[in-house]
Amino acid sequence: MIRAGIIGATGYAGAEILRILAVHPNVEVKWIGSRSYADQKIASVYGNLFHVVDLSLINDDTEQMKKEILKLAEEVDVIFTATPQGACAGLVSRELLEKVKIIDMSADFRLKDVSVYEAWYKIHHASPEFLPEAVYGLVEINRKDIPSARLLANPGCYTTCSILTAYPLVEAGLIDTDTLIVDALSGVSGAGRGAKTANLYCEVNESAKPYGVASHRHTPEIEEQLSYACGHPVTINFTPHLVPMNRGILVTEYASLIRKKDGTLPSEEELLEVYEKRYGNERFIRILPAGQYPETRFVEGSNYVDISLKVDGRTGRVIMMGAIDNMGKGSASQAVQNMNLMFGLPEETAISLPAMMP
């Protein structure tokens, strides 16, 4: 039985991890933490866990954790850190990683260049010496490196969908990456559970808006992973949008196609074959038939990624589309998928349910 602990269990990501682990046949959750709800029962914060998880929350304030983390690590095999940027980096040490595996939900270990992290996140990185060994946990891209990982960086929600949607064509050199544009729509849960005026019902209902224009912090993460795919630096335009739904991400990506030697464009069928070849054996990626496009309702509450594309022969561009649940494949269920592989379990354990309908 895998023993697990969760730091930040009362945020949306932490609570979703707990909900999944509560029914995982190979996991026992030993402790859960919260800064805001210390000493309370988790079911008093999340009523959906009443009679499901009977645990009280320990105080996981950052300074408190620094004192207690090595002792807490003795009780578990894996710790999920569902915390703001900077928290996990402040806790990680060689001694800790000798005791326990860490799955970090923040961006602390996603970017290999510490100067890029500090420039985009505007904070000092407390443990850059661990960046080289951290594994970027996008299973469908880095599957072979995940089983041996001690420190795993769970990808961001926008980044998971944006990278997986474009990756096969970038890797195959079939698009001009200098022309790549990513537009993304996200449900409000992506902003977290903290009380913010901009996220109040009356502020988001019946409205949609772009935000983080030309400055969203997931931009360098997408660029870095796509750069690995094609072997040269990739720079994109990425524009996220907030839409009035609870969960889900839909990305639409545009890029100019590389013409064949005879001057013609690759056909839709040829491009879909590239996706099938790259993802055909992947449990959670579904390549939709030509003419069928992703919808967030068909992935809600699941770990699935739905991907499709359309060739625009008039402009010589391809339109790539992808959908995920931002709290599922974009966060918690992907973290559990990574944990399963890190402990030698089938990757689909506890996360194989299809989307909720309606």
Image: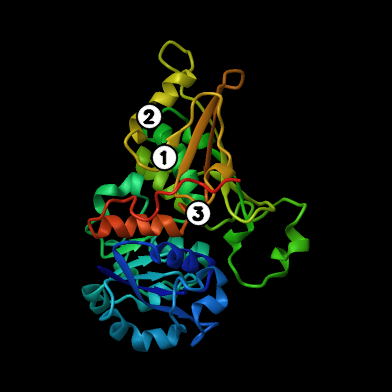
- Badge 1 density bin: few <14, some 14–19, many ≥20, Cα 10 Å: many
Res. 237 image quadrant: top right
Nearer to us of marks 3 and 1 is: 1
Does residue 173 appear to the left or right of 130 in the view shown? right
Q: From mark 3 to mark 2, how far is it between C-alphas? A: 23 Å
Mark number, residue 285: 1
Q: Earlier in the sequence, mark 3 or mark 2?
A: 3
Amino acid on which disc 1 is placed: Ile
Query: What number is the disc on residue 157?
Result: 3
Which secondary structure, mark 1? strand
Looking at marks 1 and 2 on the same chain, the residue that comes earlier in the sequence is marked by: 2
Residue in the picture at 59% in, 56% down: 215
Indicate the secondary structure of the residue bearing disc 2.
helix
Q: Is residue 182 visible?
A: no
Residue 84 percent across, percent down from the top left: 50, 71
The front one of 21 and 255 is: 21
